[in-house]
């Protein structure tokens, strides 16, 4: 993997922009996202109940990850009007050997293919900028919507296991990233 750069991570897709979170600006939308029933059911309760909690979550979670690893959950917004719709990115957990893909959208933005679009660009950034050759993804065993997205991205279910003693088993998906095409040699003529 390349060294984490000081340059903020930016990923652009046809409809979306992904940027590192801003602790102050993004706290309100993150407070809402982390308290959506779908987030709590399928990802977990992060105990974020106030704007100060949301700022701390962003500072110690996604923002710290980007600085430390060169990747982390990014803010996903619409290119048209800048509306923040959710988060997507590569997470590094102590319980998994390589980064895993994570995402969550506010429910009014489901069903438009936005997470597939964001994820494809995040994976390409992981391959080309970070030199990753494989990524994982984990879902709760009943998160059908997330599993459908992962399968569409080409990920395959490899295992169902608990990542920590006493934790509920999760589905572990894996995707091999194609090697970068070799650079064209300059002509010697
Ligand atoms: C998981 C989650 C992000 C999936 O959202 P999503 O919008 O279904 O994801 P996708 O980007 O794969 O979109 C696929 C849907 O968009 C539709 N779609 C519309 N336009 C599309 C396009 N241009 N390209 C692809 N799909 C498109 C598809 O038909 C599909 O809709 P359907 O499921 O109603 O048939 C969302 O359910 C969520 O935030 N859940 C809560 C958090 C969570 O569980 N996170 C994952 C933890 S592992």
Image: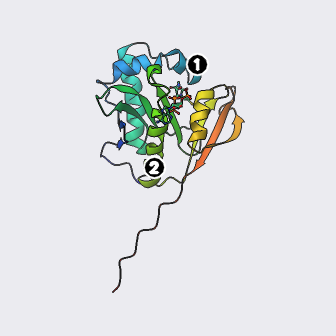
In this figure, which colouring scheme has been used for the structure? rainbow
Residue at (47, 15) in percent of width and height? 35
How many angstroms separate mark 1 from mark 2 (CA)? 29 Å
Q: Where 31 falls versus 6 (above or below)?
A: above
Of residues 45 and 153, the one drawn nearer to the viewer in this rendering: 153
State yes or no: Cβ of the residue under disc 1 lies below 8 Å from any atom of ligand 1: yes
Residue at (41, 16) in percent of width and height? 32
Of residues 65 and 175, the one drawn nearer to the viewer in this rendering: 175
Residue under numbered circle 2: 124
Q: Is residue 87 left or right of residue 142?
A: left
* Mark 1 vs mark 2: in front: 2
Rendered location of residue 76, percent (x, y): 38, 32
Element type at marker 1? Answer: helix
Q: In which quarter of the image is residue 85?
A: top left
Given contact means CB atoms under 8 Å apart, are the residues at marks 1 and 2 in contact?
no
Rendered location of residue 61, percent (x, y): 43, 31
Residue under numbered circle 1: 41
């Amino acid at each position: 993997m390349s060294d984490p750069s000081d340059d903020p991570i930016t990923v652009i897709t046809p409809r979306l922009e992904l940027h590192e979170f801003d602790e102050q600006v993004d706290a309100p939308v993150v407070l809402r996202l982390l308290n959506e029933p779908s987030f709590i059911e399928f990802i977990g309760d992060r105990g974020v109940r106030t704007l100060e909690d949301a700022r701390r979550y962003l500072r110690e979670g996604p923002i710290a990850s980007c600085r430390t690893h060169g990747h982390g959950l990014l803010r996903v917004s619409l290119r048209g009007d800048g509306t923040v719709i959710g988060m997507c990115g590569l997470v590094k957990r102590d319980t998994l050997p390589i980064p895993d893909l994570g995402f969550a959208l506010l429910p009014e933005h489901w069903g438009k293919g936005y997470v597939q679009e964001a994820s494809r660009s995040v994976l390409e950034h992981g391959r080309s900028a970070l030199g990753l050759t494989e990524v994982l993804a984990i879902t709760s065993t009943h998160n059908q919507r997330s599993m459908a997205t992962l399968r569409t991205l080409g990920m395959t279910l490899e295992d169902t296991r608990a990542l920590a003693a006493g934790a509920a088993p999760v589905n572990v998906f894996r995707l091999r990233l194609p090697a970068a095409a070799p650079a064209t040699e300059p002509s010697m003529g």
